Image (cartoon, rainbow, N blue to C red):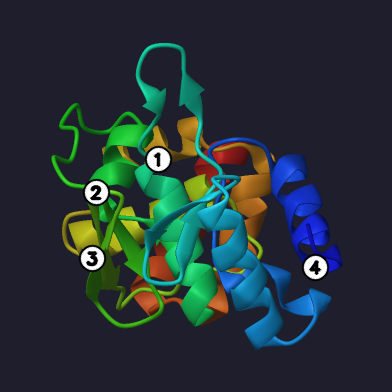
Amino acid sequence: MSAMADKIMKRVRAKGRGWVFTPKHFIDFGTRGSVDMALSRLAQNGEIRRIGRGLYDYPQLHDKLGALTPDAEMIAQAVSAQSGDRLAPSAAAAANKLGLSTQVPARASYATTGRTRVRQAAGRSVTLKHSRAPVLGNASEAANGVVQFLAGLGRDKVDADAISQLAARLDDKDVQALIKGRAQMPGWMGDVVLKIGAAHHG
């Protein structure tokens, strides 16, 4: 194994099985060409698996089923890293995760700061939808989920009930991140965030 391949595998193993990655994740190791070459060699040797254009994974293994399909969220994160976009849960996924809806979105869909696109990887299709609402940089998935959820609801649908439910489901750090991110939000959403903050600390 080349020194480059060796360094790549060290990082891959440190991340653990199930990790989905792109050549961009190793750009600090050398030129893009040498990273690409090492990755394709590792894939040929079966150390890693190529799952799509410029996408690889270190598959989780099952006793009977062999290599498992990668997790949709891992694919979405890798695709975002590839294009340098930020990622957030879709409004529907956020509503489900925050316990505000029992509907589980049928399709893996995420909000992104980049353009809308569908990526196929390992037989799985992941939809990235351009978000009109901001995706906050230093915020958790829950905090960004709230932004997408509010954007999906719209300014006229946010009632006291929704505010108290969101306040109850966020921790202090999430509320702080939302309040910090108000400058990036439309005015009405920033005002809702203040109300969530007051209800959370109330």
Q: Is residue 52 above or below residue 93?
A: below
Residue holding disc 1: 71
Crowd class of label 3 (few under 14; some 14 to 19; many from 20; radius 10 Å): some
Q: What secondary structure is marked by label 3?
A: loop
Residue holding disc 2: 124
Q: Is residue 19 above or below residue 22?
A: above
Crowd class of label 4 (few under 14; some 14 to 19; many from 20; radius 10 Å): some
Three-letter amino acid code at the position of disc 4 = Met
Residue holding disc 4: 4
Residue 49, horizontal then vertical, whole percent: 48, 50
Which of the marked residues, 2 or 4, is nearer the chain's N terminus? 4
* In the displayed structure image, the side of residue 100 where residue 181 appears, left or right: right
Between residue 191 and residue 28, name the one nearer to us. 28
Q: Calculate the distance from the C-alpha at mark 1 to the C-alpha at mark 2.
A: 9 Å
Q: Nearer the viewer, mark 1 or mark 4?
A: 4
Three-letter amino acid code at the position of disc 3 = Arg
